[in-house]
Amino acid sequence: MVVNVWATWCPPCRVEMPGFVDLQREFEDAGVQFVGIAVDWGGAEAVRPFVEEKGVNFPQIVDPGLAARHFPGEAVPRTYLIDKKGRIRYEHSGVILKWALDDALERLVREGQ
């Protein structure tokens, strides 16, 4: 699983989102699931238009409190790779580009086979 803590008002979040959409499509058959946790205080009304416009193909949870409880930190975006046993195996604060996340996902998927 890939969990991304993000916000619509965050320019780096907007930069990395298309890569996440591509990676969700590419790794879906390998059992990888992306999940976004949006920290917008404007709620779903702020997030939904962005998600629809960008064609985001993975679930979004709009809950700053959930992000703070389970994935604490100040920076957005924050990205976490979680293995099949529920362990956080990789954590990154700030923008992460598709190629870097692709490499980490490849390693994690190979490990689980």
Image (cartoon, rainbow, N blue to C red):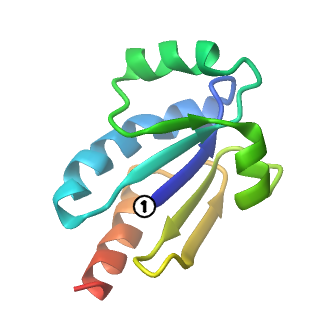
Identify the residue at horizontal 25%, vertical 64% (top origin).
Answer: 31
Count the numbered circles shown: 1
Identify the residue at horizontal 75%, vertical 39% (top origin).
Answer: 64
Q: Position of residue 91 (x, y in %)?
A: 61, 68
User: From the viewer's perspective, is residue 76 above or below residue 62?
Assistant: below
* Left or right, residue 86 beside residue 27: right
Q: For this rendering, which residue is in front, 108 or 33?
A: 33
Instruction: Please state, as top left, top right, bottom left or bottom right, where the N terminus lies in the image.
Output: bottom left
Instruction: Please state, as top left, top right, bottom left or bottom right, where the C terminus lies in the image.
Output: bottom left
Give the residue type that dot 1 points to.
Leu
SS at circle 1: helix
Q: Is residue 87 visible?
A: yes
Q: Position of residue 58 (x, y in %)?
A: 37, 40
* Left or right, residue 103 beside residue 17: left
Q: Is residue 71 visible?
A: no
Label 1 Cα neighbours within 10 Å, binned few <14 / some 14-19 / many ≥20: some
Residue behind mark 1: 101
